Image: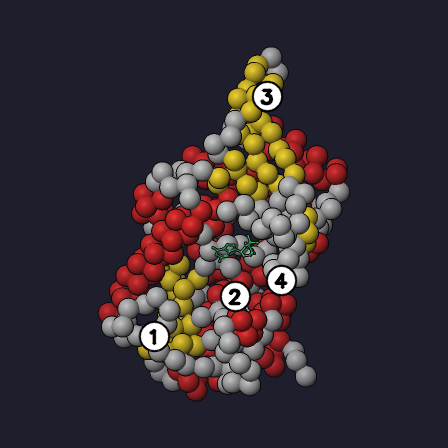
Amino acid sequence: TWTSSNIIDEQVAAIRSVVGDKQVICGLSGGVDSAVAAALVHRAVGDQLTCIFVDHGLLRAGEAEQVEKDYVAATGIRLKVVDASERFLGALDGVTDPERKRKIIGREFIRVFEQAAREVDAERDVEFLVQGTLYPDVVESGGGTGTANIKSHHNVGGLPDDLQFSLIEPLRTLFKDEVRALGTQLGLPDEMVQRHPFPGPGLAIRIIGAVSRERLDVLRQADLIAREELTAAGLDRDVWQFPVVLLADVRSVGVQGDGRTYGHPVVLRPVSSEDAMTADWSRLPFDLIARISNRITNEVAEINRVVLDVTSKPPGTIEWE
Ligand code: XMP
């Protein structure tokens, strides 16, 4: 029968026999899957694993620290952090088109990760790369079923030919809720294990308009308030995701005290979903919406209006870009 401790024991044994005394790397994104995959591999081979965290500067408040501090404290994993926010912001400067944002972020990410992987490889002669592929990803990409828990093949997407690693995918038979249970069993911080899905391009696709450090700071503050209030209301598990979107090129007139303001709106986009293919807007309690709105407009000077997205998917997507 399925229990997280069975899975851990099985996977640890399997990983040990595949890896032997070779060196392993793993990229951490801040998300659940890579965090659990790395923790599992660390349990199996300890310091033969080096993790790489590329901080692209587009994460939400506290998320980079969660990886760099809490996760490392919980696991004892050796972590190489690359602060690449300057580089990502430079590459994104003035870019407003959603697909261009995605392309630029994807391209820069591979370049930065590749460089970091090369450095680790030069020091330790790396043989394996861990990926947090889940069962639904395997099915989606036509990988089929019944294969071994750990499948190795070469030429990992995006990495150049002369930088070849064999893949270790210890989560490829598991669903998300099983991965979360595993993460808890492995002692990972709750905020990380229960984290809602978050897009790779991060807050860049939640700023409608060009991305800048100032705009990211504004969005981070509003996003943190929404998350805090959702958690305080005990409703984290009731929503699939809760994007907060900054309409950076839109301004509207407001009034505060005696003064007229001319600020930006944010959109609250809480959605309910099973798999992100379709979604409905979450019927969050109005008093919760009101608290979030009051706090954002009181605490974030640049925001003077909060609106609620009441569009299902389709026709709307979950993200605004
Ligand atoms: P949409 O907006 O298409 O999003 O309804 C569906 C799910 O995918 C996430 N998403 C992304 N994830 N890179 C990612 O890793 C992306 O470029 C990206 N765009 C959307 C989104 O957060 C939702 O969970």
- Give the x, y percent position of residue 70: 50, 56
Dot 1 corresponds to which residue?
Answer: 155
Which residue is situated farthest in the top direction here? 258
Q: Is residue 162 left or right of residue 51?
A: left
Q: Is residue 120 visible?
A: no
Mark 2 vs mark 4, CA separation in Å:
15 Å
Q: Is residue 273 left or right of residue 134?
A: right
First in residue order: circle 4 vs circle 1: 1
Q: Amino acid at mark 4?
A: Asp
Would you say the residues marked 4 and 1 are in contact, meaning their CB atoms lie under 8 Å apart?
Answer: no
Q: Residue at x 73, y 46 (%)?
A: 283
Dot 4 corresponds to which residue?
Answer: 275
First in residue order: circle 4 vs circle 3: 3
Crowdedness near tag 2: few (<14), some (14–19) or many (≥20) residues, C-alpha within 10 Å:
many
- Say which of 79 and 233 sits in front: 233
Q: Amino acid at mark 3?
A: Gly
Dot 3 corresponds to which residue?
Answer: 254
Q: Residue at x 50, y 78 (%)?
A: 143
Dot 2 corresponds to which residue?
Answer: 33
Q: Secondary structure at mark 3?
A: strand
**Relative to 65, does residue 184 appear above or below in the rendering?**
below
Q: Amino acid at mark 2?
A: Asp
Mark 1 vs mark 3, CA separation in Å:
55 Å
Q: Residue at x 36, y 51 (%)?
A: 104
Q: Residue at x 39, y 80 (%)?
A: 153
- Give the x, y percent position of residue 147: 51, 85
- Give the x, y percent position of residue 205: 48, 46
**Relative to 193, does residue 246 appear above or below in the rendering?**
above
